[in-house]
Image (cartoon, rainbow, N blue to C red):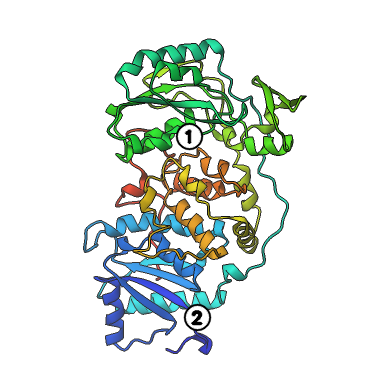
């Protein structure tokens, strides 16, 4: 069968060596007519197909990608296609948020004896891709310059720890300190409005400790580097979820950890607050209550309503008592999680596919590839072995093009699929304010829909859904090409 309409498109196929590649060979031996658009890449198992294979192909000019493996319960390696099924279904539902038509990707199952089925699969998929036409190229799409806001109407106060509660915390840490190598907390940064991590190793260090709505650094990011030491850490609800996730993955040890839990009603969005303040020389005084922030800046008093500068992610946080806590302080019953979407994700949901791709194109023109998003993420534990910087294999070039920048963000997001605890540090630390948390939030939504409401970091006994499988999936249907 010649290429449809005598006009070939670029279609990439990842075929399992033991079944689907054999099925394609059976079709060829039987002289079954097939489209010539497909370029086949043979892999040992469909479980070997990383979702990044598919996205790299689509970003680099493929008009469609097909993955085909052994039928479920018939894998040469026993369980490879069960893991693949979960990853590939998450990927298919992830594509629209990038502005890529999900119809350009499909996965199916073909055994070595099913030559006729293979002919039907490849012919139908090729017809569908031809109906869609050539895929838009990310680097050629028109950037979308559309006004948008990442702020969300706040319904609650920000976190303020009373002096009495802070003294209780300090005393508890001082009592435990002889048994610990260090305790992770926060201290004043370059001025009163900014906080940085504090490594408490003596009682003298406790005088520097602060815990309020300016302390947004997720201290859990340091725990994997301190493995083998006995460490204490101060956590709120969002940080505690990161601790649970690292414990689930065996990246830290519970026996080496002492958790001090604090209640939290919300954190300040410091980039937006800095924008409202404008440039200043001296921050002379700061008074923070749950509803009001009073600053004395360069001799002038400025007053802000904290609800106007509360981080949008705090609306989705229940602020409940962490799932793990050795000692807890204060009242954890003051907040109810909002059911609304994060504003970044709600904005993207309102766009069509072409507009989403144009939006990300405009964002990537501003990205400076500083990797602050990755470096501040508590779940990014690869450090110097990050695939985005590896040259063996060479996943990314050193070229600072919009396509390469976008691929880096995709790598980071997909490596957090089913693992992102929603702390928002990636976006909070972006120096140019890119709404990259939307990618993680969308993946969290997909995982929740597919795997019975699963949320990363909530249950210490749960297994992350992409690290396990089920022979019968309740929300993933076998894809049929009959």
Query: Vertically, is 135 above or below 346?
Result: below
Crowding at dot 1, Cα within 10 Å, few <14 / some 14-19 / many 20+, comes out as many
Q: Which residue is mark 2?
A: 9
| Residue 166 in the figure: left or right of residue 354 | left
Location of the N terminus (image quadrant):
bottom left
Q: Name which quarter of the figure residue 154 lies in.
A: top right
Q: Does the image show residue 101? A: no
The x, y position of residue 333, in whole percent, is: 52, 19
Q: Marks 2 and 1: which is nearer the front?
A: 1
Query: Vertically, is 281 above or below 25?
Result: above
Q: Name which quarter of the figure residue 172 lies in.
A: top left
| Residue 379 in the figure: left or right of residue 48 | right
The x, y position of residue 89, in whole percent, is: 42, 57
The x, y position of residue 217, in whole percent, is: 51, 34
Location of the C terminus (image quadrant):
bottom left
217 and 263: which one is in front?
217
Which labelled disc corresponds to residue 218?
A: 1
Crowding at dot 2, Cα within 10 Å, few <14 / some 14-19 / many 20+, comes out as many
């Amino acid at each position: 069968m010649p290429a449809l309409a005598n006009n070939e498109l670029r279609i990439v196929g990842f075929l399992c060596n033991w079944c689907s590649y054999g099925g394609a060979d059976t079709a060829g031996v039987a002289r079954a007519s097939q489209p010539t658009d497909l370029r086949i890449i043979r892999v040992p198992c469909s479980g070997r197909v990383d979702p990044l294979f598919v996205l790299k192909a689509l970003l680099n000019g493929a008009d469609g990608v097909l993955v085909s493996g052994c039928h479920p319960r018939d894998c040469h390696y026993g369980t490879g296609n069960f893991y693949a099924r979960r990853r590939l279904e998450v990927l298919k539902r992830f594509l629209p948020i990038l502005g890529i038509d999900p119809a350009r990707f499909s996965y199916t199952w073909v055994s070595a004896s099913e030559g006729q089925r293979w002919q039907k699969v490849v012919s139908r998929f090729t017809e569908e891709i031809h109906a869609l036409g050539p895929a838009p190229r990310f680097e050629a799409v028109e950037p979308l310059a559309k006004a948008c806001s990442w702020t969300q109407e706040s319904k609650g106060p920000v976190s303020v720890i009373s002096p009495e509660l802070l003294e209780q915390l300090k005393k508890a840490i001082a009592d435990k300190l002889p048994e610990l190598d260090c305790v992770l907390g926060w201290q004043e940064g370059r001025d009163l409005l900014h906080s940085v991590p504090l490594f408490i190793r003596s009682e003298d260090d406790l005088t520097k400790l602060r815990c309020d709505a300016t302390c947004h650094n997720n201290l859990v990011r340091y725990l994997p580097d301190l493995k083998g030491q006995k460490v204490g850490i101060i956590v709120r609800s969002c940080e505690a979820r990161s601790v649970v996730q690292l414990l689930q993955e065996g990246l830290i040890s519970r026996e080496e950890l002492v958790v001090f839990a604090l209640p939290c009603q919300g954190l300040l969005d410091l980039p937006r607050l800095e924008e409202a303040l404008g440039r200043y020389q001296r921050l002379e005084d700061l008074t923070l209550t749950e509803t009001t922030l009073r600053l004395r800046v360069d001799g002038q008093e400025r007053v802000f309503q904290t609800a106007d500068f509360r981080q949008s992610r705090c609306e989705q946080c229940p602020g409940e008592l962490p799932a793990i806590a050795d000692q807890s302080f204060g009242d954890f019953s003051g907040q109810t999680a909002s059911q609304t979407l994060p504003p970044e994700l709600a904005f993207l949901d309102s766009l069509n596919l072409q507009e989403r791709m144009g939006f990300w194109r405009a964002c990537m023109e501003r990205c400076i590839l500083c990797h602050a998003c990755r470096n501040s993420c508590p779940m990014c534990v690869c450090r110097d072995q990050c695939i985005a910087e590896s040259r063996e294999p060479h996943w990314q070039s050193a070229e600072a093009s919009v396509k390469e920048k976008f691929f880096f963000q995709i790598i980071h997001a997909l490596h957090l699929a089913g693992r992102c605890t929603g702390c928002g540090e990636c976006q909070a630390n972006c120096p140019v304010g890119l709404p990259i948390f939307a990618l993680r939030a969308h993946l969290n939504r997909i995982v929740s829909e597919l795997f019975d409401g699963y949320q990363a970091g909530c249950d210490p006994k749960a297994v992350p859904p992409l690290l396990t499988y089920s022979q019968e999936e309740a929300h993933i249907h076998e894809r049929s090409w009959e």
